[in-house]
Image (cartoon, grey):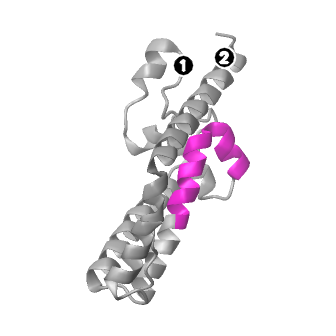
């Protein structure tokens, strides 16, 4: 917790962020807003994957070659479901994609709030948990891929 204390004491400005901080927050919020707008334009694919093809992106080569989805199959579909409030369908399509979409929408709101109000969010404490965050994220990512493969296997009996 020493890092957090140093950040709070050393900055001097804990109530309002600088113009750089506000600009960075607005940029992050803008990137998240762009992803949300794209997800709103995409119709979720009934199969649970393949929605990205509406953005003129190629079909998943891994899926075509093996019959099983790649680790990111269903992400666009999950995002498209989340922005429509269809959380159950989003989780069924790609659990990790649903989680990332919720994080993206939340981060968008927090970022725009920071940009407008200047409120500083002290995230220095997360540095102490970075290894857990990375390992946990990787495990969740692999579990999401396993879920996708299991769905395909049960559906087609491969």
Task: Estimate the spatial distance between the alpha carbons at disc 1 and disc 2, rounded to whole Å.
Answer: 8 Å
Label at residue 119 = none
For label 2, the SS is: helix
- Which span is picked out in magenta? 87-106
For label 1, the SS is: loop
Query: Does residue 2 show up?
Result: yes
Residue 11 belongs to magenta span: no
Residue 112 position (above or below residue 68): below
Which secondary structure is most common in the magenta stretch?
A: helix
Among the two numbered marks 1 and 2 on one chain, the one whose residue lies closer to the N terminus: 1
The residue positioned farthest toward the top in the image shown:
158
Q: How crowded is mark 1: few (under 14 residues within 10 Å), some or many (20 or more)?
A: some
Query: Does residue 38 show up?
Result: no
Residue 79 position (above or below residue 85): above
Residue 95 belongs to magenta span: yes
The residue depicted at 55 percent of the width and 65 percent of the height is: 106
Residue 153 spot, x, y in % from top left:
66, 17
Q: Residues within 10 Å of mark 2 (few under 14, many from 20)?
A: few
Split into 4 quadrants, where in the image is the C terminus?
top right
* Pointer 1 with pointer 2, Cβ within 8 A: yes
Q: Name the residue under label 1.
A: 68
Q: Name the residue under label 2.
A: 153
Residue 32 spot, x, y in % from top left:
43, 62
The residue depicted at 52 percent of the width and 24 percent of the height is: 69
């Amino acid at each position: 917790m020493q890092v957090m204390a140093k950040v709070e004491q050393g900055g001097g400005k804990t109530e309002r962020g600088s113009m750089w901080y506000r600009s960075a927050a607005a940029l992050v919020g803008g990137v998240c807003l762009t992803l949300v707008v794209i997800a709103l334009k995409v119709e979720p694919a009934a199969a649970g994957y393949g929605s990205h093809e509406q953005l003129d992106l190629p079909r998943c080569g891994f899926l075509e070659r093996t019959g099983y989805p790649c680790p990111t199959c269903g992400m666009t579909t999950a995002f498209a479901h989340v922005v429509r409030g269809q959380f159950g369908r989003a989780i069924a399509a790609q659990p990790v994609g649903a989680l990332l979409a919720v994080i993206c929408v939340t981060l968008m709101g927090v970022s725009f709030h920071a940009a407008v109000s200047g409120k500083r969010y002290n995230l220095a404490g997360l540095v102490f948990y970075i290894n857990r965050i990375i390992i946990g994220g990787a495990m969740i990512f692999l579990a999401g891929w396993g879920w996708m493969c299991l769905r395909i296997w049960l559906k087609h009996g491969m």
